[in-house]
Image (cartoon, rainbow, N blue to C red):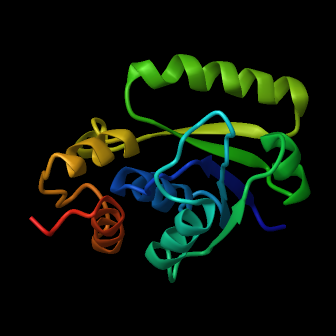
Amino acid sequence: MEKIAVYPGSFDPVTNGHLDVLKRALKIFDKVIIAVGENPNKKYLFSLKERIDMLKKVTKGLKVEIEALNGLLVNFAKRKKAIAIVRGLRAVSDFDYEFQSALMNRKLNKNIETIFIMTRGMYCYLSASIVKEVARLGANLNGMIPKYVEKKLREKLKIKDV
């Protein structure tokens, strides 16, 4: 039986920290389904389609599927026959929210585990929000996001290359 996990997130945009967690999850699971969320209460820089397209480009060659996440995460995971939800942790500040979410998901479906993967130290400061902020201010994004994503981010923000 194939071991499938779901890796949810907004990925606005996908960072090297996201990819680090994904690649490490692929060492544990046979396949990872990246579930790209669309929260109506959140303002995104990139559309859902753009985020999915960027993920497809930067995960080419990896054993992943990329889909839009609609509805409850645990229901999505169950439909996909996933045994686990993968969540990345950067700092202690992430843990409280992720712990509460994991407990709620456990209450909603006791058959789906939540697996936390600590990001590597080199990415612990990195978030999509910070990347967008420093990009707007003209920072060099080397090592933070894939080159393709950087190109798309600079196009979206109308920023010339640094």
Residue 122, above or below 161: above
Quadrant of the image for the C terminus?
bottom left
Quadrant housing the N terminus: bottom right
Residue 20 picture location, percent across and down: 40, 56
How many numbered badges does the structure rendering display?
0
Residue at 12 percent of width and 56 percent of height: 140
Q: Where, by quadrant of the figure, is residue 161 drawn? A: bottom left
Residue 30: % across, % down: 67, 67
Q: Residue at x 90, y 56 (%)?
A: 79
> Compared to 99, does 17 lie above or below?
below
> Which residue in the rendered view is the most extreme toward the left?
162
Q: Is residue 149 left or right of residue 1?
A: left
Q: For this view, does 85 lie left or right of residue 150?
A: right
Dividing the picture into quadrants, the one containing residue 50 is bottom right
Q: Is residue 143 left or right of residue 81?
A: left
Nearer to the camera, 26 or 96:
96
Q: Residue furthest bottom?
A: 61
| Front one among 112 and 129 | 129
Which residue is pictured at 34% across the width and 57% down the height? Answer: 16
Q: Residue at position x 36%, y 63% from top?
A: 156
- Place of residue 147 in the rendered image (x, y in percent of width and height, measured from the top left): 27, 72
Taking 77 as reference, is 88 left or right?
left
Q: x and y percent of residue 3 in the render?
A: 75, 61
